[in-house]
Image: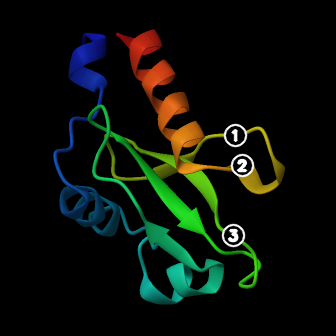
Amino acid sequence: MTAAATRPAYRTITEIKAANRAAGDHFFDRAQLRLFGTRIVTHVLAGSWFITADHLVPAEAPDFTIHRAQHDGNITTLDGPALYHNWPTLAAARGAVRSLALAAA
């Protein structure tokens, strides 16, 4: 099987949510998202990546976390430069995804 055949190719967050639910995972459950103050802030990037804004401390500005939807619907979180895998700005997180997508191409 080629790398392209094993690489997930999602077009929408809805597709990722459905695959995640089918895998029996709970990444997108409302209670889970509420617990971490999480909002999805991008569309699907490079076929499998998306970014969330996380308000771990409600009074502070959000941190941004990069996630990847795997071909089996599971979600992995990319280790970031700060505590809890987060990037300090959406622009920094988008730049990291761009670099990852270029490196994988």
Q: Position of residue 37 (x, y in %)?
A: 59, 80
83 horizontally vs 26: left or right: right
Is mark 2 in CB contact (under 8 Å) with mark 1?
A: yes
Residue named by callout 1: 79
- Looking at marks 2 and 1 on the same chain, the residue that comes earlier in the sequence is marked by 1
64 horizontally vs 45: left or right: right
| Residue lying at 43% horizontally and 81% vertically, measured from the top left | 29
- Looking at marks 3 and 1 on the same chain, the residue that comes earlier in the sequence is marked by 3
Which residue type does callout 3 highlight? Ala
Residue named by callout 2: 85
- Looking at marks 2 and 3 on the same chain, the residue that comes earlier in the sequence is marked by 3
Q: Secondary structure at mark 2?
A: helix
Q: Position of residue 39 (x, y in %)?
A: 46, 72
Which residue type does callout 2 highlight? His
Mark in the foreground, 3 or 1: 3
| Residue lying at 21% horizontally and 43% vertically, measured from the top left | 10
| Residue lying at 75% horizontally and 75% vertically, measured from the top left | 60
Residue named by callout 3: 61
